[in-house]
Amino acid sequence: MPRKILLTGSRHFVALKEARILHDSGCEVYTADSVNFDYTMYSNAVKKHFLVPSVRFEETKYIEKLCEIIIEYKIDEVVALGEETFYLSNNIQKIRQSCSDVCIKLDSLDKLSTLHNKWLFYKLSMSLKFTVPKTALVKSPSEIAKLQQWSSQHSVIKPIYSRFGYEVKELYDINMTVLESLDWDDEDGYIIQEYIKGEDISSFSMSSDGSDIITYKSALTTSAPGAMAAAIRVETPQQVRDIDIKIRKALNYSGQLGLDFLLTPDGEIVLLEANPRATIGRVLMRQPKIQFRIMMLHQFLNGLIPLRAWLKYFWVMTWYPDMVWSWRDIRPAFMSQIMCKGLGTYLRFLSRHSGVSFQAYSTYDMEYNGDKVIISKVENPTKNDDKTILSLLEGLSRKGMFYLIYTRRPSPLLSFKHEQANIGVIKDSRQDIKYMCACSHDEYYINGKSCGLGYLSAVRKNPTFQGFIDWRMPFFNYFSERNYFFSVMKSNSRAIQAFTRPHESLVLSSLVADYNIMIINARRIAVPHHSKCIFKNTVGINRAELLEFINREGRKYNFFPVVNEYLLQRLDITDKNSFVLLRDGNIVGFAGLVDQRKWKQFIIVRYAWILRFIRIPFNLFARRLSYISIPKQDKTVICPTATIFVVSENDQNLYKELLYGLSCEARKKADIFTLAVTTKSPLYRSLQTRYNFAIENNLYIQEINGLAVDGKQVYVDALMLY
């Protein structure tokens, strides 16, 4: 039987070459990665590709999925090529316990981290007496200012963990503008090094005896540091060979090792940093030159190729062999270079994470930046944060034929304060918001009893923040509720993953109900037959009797709010905008119809061109035919919200009467109103018509103190879930 090999980190071009070589040698090749721009998966050399969770953001799930693959497909050997190597090493015992027969050659995480961490590698290099740039570890701009030796020197500052030259900045003096632009929240800090002029060269090896060391350099001159888009192998200096062997011996290291050097005009070799993973050097072991056409094109379009190097650029692109192209295996090149799949996914990513380079994006969800938990402090926002919070709120829109946002103009802080909601923000060292969250506390009926719950809303991550923290525990501790619940649009898969990701200190959040925010055509609600009820506002209604009815009926649901005068006042429910159904003088139904445009708004910020074209002619006859007119772009949509919607004994006929009464009230000012309803409610079926519009949502509960929810029907309230 052929030997079965699983390649992880198969997004890299190195993996494509490796798969082809293994396949030609008679192996059965499988690949696994967490991105959808993996070109290796299209290769004829690959028997099966597996889409796995992100190893950086879902480490436990990644390891579990990998073990499932190994067991099910009887994998003989796992070959790690990218930075998933660190996570595999961190979980090596778990993998070997679950998959005792698989061969997986990995060094310990301590050894890998010593090579990967630029400060630890510098200290190792100093101990081995290598020639290295003068270097210092700094954790704040003020620390740099105290280092007098850097005050006038040309220097370089870069994060402890980085790749492709990403976030490397040059300093010609103590430039505080540049320094303050860096993210100093990371406790690891930065290293600052003297600038040394020279030619970049790199080495790569895979064995500890130095027999396979190769050296290469970039075939192109670029105006900024970055991954090599084209490279050529050169003769390996003896000093490079000696350095590789000494590092391996000092660490007893046997894995892949890439080293970066500077070759000065005087012929001196200066060691810069190490990469304990596959680099393009692994490909250059088998051929003398290489180029990556899609990466070269990206560098050219981004102005990284100086004008003086254009002739060389086009010569290299024409005559150097392309890493991806093969007439015998054409699909990877077709997907990357003709279909531009990677570029398309990058542009979508860039809309959420502006400023991230193409190379940084290629490893975004597999990077290893140290085995640590970033503890972030949650604090109250200030008035200066109001505009930022508003932009974060409006950054999330429902997309399609129109872009609908839910916002809180002109002031989110005043809006949240009005509804007695607390806001927490996590900031970086520049006082920019990284995450925000709001929480309102109310009493709800759970299993027939009053229970205090915190409702989480307005959770946003600033798209300019490129790091990752598990924000849940800091916010949960900040708001100090016993239990929480939250609602997420069904289409927002990223938010669902963020809320429901496993955590060692949390019980997994559980789905309580699917529900829809129904945008109801007020002119299309059918007139109830044989009505024996009176629909009127609550002016003159006995308040004690009204509250007793609402709570008596609401107790029959889970998540029905415990209603008192304070809650009604907070929701802006008055005698004039709340209504009852009376039968034989008794209350049998209640609902509020609240217009909160003063505090919260729906706004359509953009229409598809076809809707912009037909809006005016359509609106000329829309109302006459009882259709919903198309609102003006960038204007607040008049859309009152039905709240505390309850009838006696869950009677469907009473629901219809109450709904019709509300529609008559709504159409005095608007064509539409909103109502939240679970998909399991009998009322939902009657609202599912082509005249109404539904926004699908999920309702979750996060149990902190072991709260269990029984099988009662779940109530959701549109106003309280905004």
Image (spheres, helix red, strand yellow):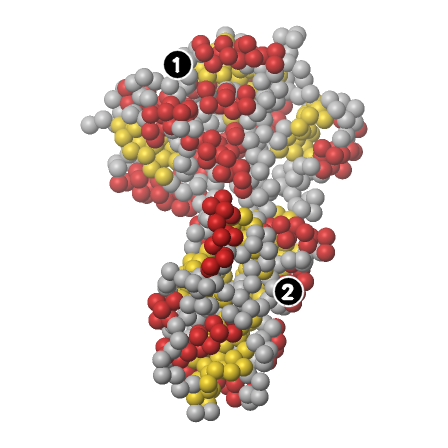
Residue placed most toward the observer, 46 or 233? 46
- Counting from the top left corner in percent of width and height, residue 392 is at 60, 50
Residue placed most toward the observer, 595 or 177? 595
- Counting from the top left corner in percent of width and height, residue 141 is at 73, 37
Q: Quadrant of the N terminus?
A: top left
At horizontal 36% and vertical 39% (from top left) the residue drawn is 51
Residue 143 in sight here: no
**Residue type beneath disc 2:** Lys
Mark 1 or mark 2, whichever is nearer to me:
2
Disc on res. 286: 1
- Counting from the top left corner in percent of width and height, residue 182 is at 67, 37
Asked whether, in this view, residue 654 is left or right of residue 29, the answer is right
Asked whether, in this view, residue 500 is left or right of residue 239, the answer is left
Kindly indicate the quadrant of the structure image that contains residue 537. bottom right
Q: Quadrant of the C terminus?
A: bottom right
**Residue type beneath disc 1:** Arg
Q: 103 above or below 683?
A: above
The residue that label 2 is drawn on is: 598
Residue placed most toward the observer, 102 or 10? 10
At horizontal 49% and vertical 44% (from top left) the residue drawn is 609
Kindly indicate the quadrant of the structure image that contains residue 527. bottom left
At horizontal 26% and vertical 36% (from top left) the residue drawn is 74
Kindly indicate the quadrant of the structure image that contains residue 221. top right
Tell me the CA gap for discs 1 and 2: 68 Å
- Counting from the top left corner in percent of width and height, residue 570 is at 61, 73
At horizontal 51% and vertical 83% (from top left) the residue drawn is 536
